[in-house]
Image (cartoon, rainbow, N blue to C red):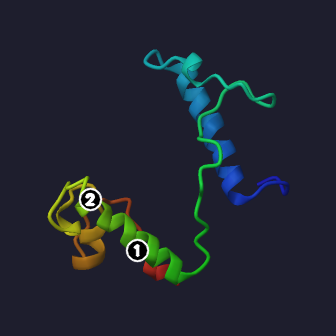
């Protein structure tokens, strides 16, 4: 963080620069796919005004996590019959303690 931007802004800037480097070094992607019309940048990797939710309290974090865990069972998606049954969800970790992904960190330990 350079003192002029938010943590979210710093994250987006850093990851965009890293992604640009990877795209330039890869034969699988074309940098032209990410050209921006903005005056202050040549390429854009993040959606503008992405409606980020600031996680300012344990209640908000748990509410958003519950929403994410329930999305696969919502009508229209129907990806699973219950949140823990969706293969790519952390719901089983939070509900049953089953760690299917080594990168998961228990957010409840941060409160």
On the rendered structure, is 100 left or right of 45? Answer: left
* Residue 99 sits in quarter: bottom left
On the rendered structure, is 20 left or right of 42? Answer: left
On the rendered structure, is 62 left or right of 86? Answer: right
Quadrant of the image for the N terminus? bottom right
Taking depth in this image into account, of 16 and 82 the one nearest to the observer is: 82
Image x and y of residue 84, in percent: 21, 68
**Other residues around mark 2 within 10 Å, as few (<14) / some (14–19) / many (≥20):** many
Image x and y of residue 9, in percent: 70, 51
- Quick one: label 2 or label 1, which is nearer the N terminus? 2
Image x and y of residue 86, in percent: 21, 59
Residue at position x 25%, y 53% in the image: 77
Tag 2 secondary structure: helix
The single residue placed furthest to the front in the displayed view is 75
Tag 1 secondary structure: loop
Residue at position x 61%, y 42% in the image: 15
On the rendered structure, is 4 left or right of 97? Answer: right
> Distance from label 2 to label 1 (Cα)?
21 Å
Image x and y of residue 91, in percent: 28, 69
**For residue 68, which numbered disc appears in the image?**
none
Taking depth in this image into account, of 41 and 103 the one nearest to the observer is: 41
Residue at position x 26%, y 59% in the image: 72
**For residue 106, which numbered disc appears in the image?**
1
Taking depth in this image into account, of 39 and 28 the one nearest to the observer is: 39
* Residue 16 sits in quarter: top right
Mark 2 vs mark 1: in front:
2
**Other residues around mark 1 within 10 Å, as few (<14) / some (14–19) / many (≥20):** few
**For residue 72, which numbered disc appears in the image?**
2
């Amino acid at each position: 963080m350079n003192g002029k931007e938010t943590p979210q802004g710093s994250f987006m800037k850093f990851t965009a620069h890293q992604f640009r480097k990877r795209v330039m070094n890869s034969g699988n992607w074309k940098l032209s796919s990410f050209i921006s019309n903005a005056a202050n940048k040549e390429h854009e990797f993040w959606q503008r005004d992405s409606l980020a939710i600031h996680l300012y309290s344990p209640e908000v974090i748990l509410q958003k996590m519950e929403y994410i865990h329930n999305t696969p069972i919502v009508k229209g998606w129907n990806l699973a019959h219950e949140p823990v049954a969706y293969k790519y969800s952390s719901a089983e970790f939070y509900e049953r303690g089953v760690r299917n992904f080594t990168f998961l960190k228990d957010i409840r330990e941060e409160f």
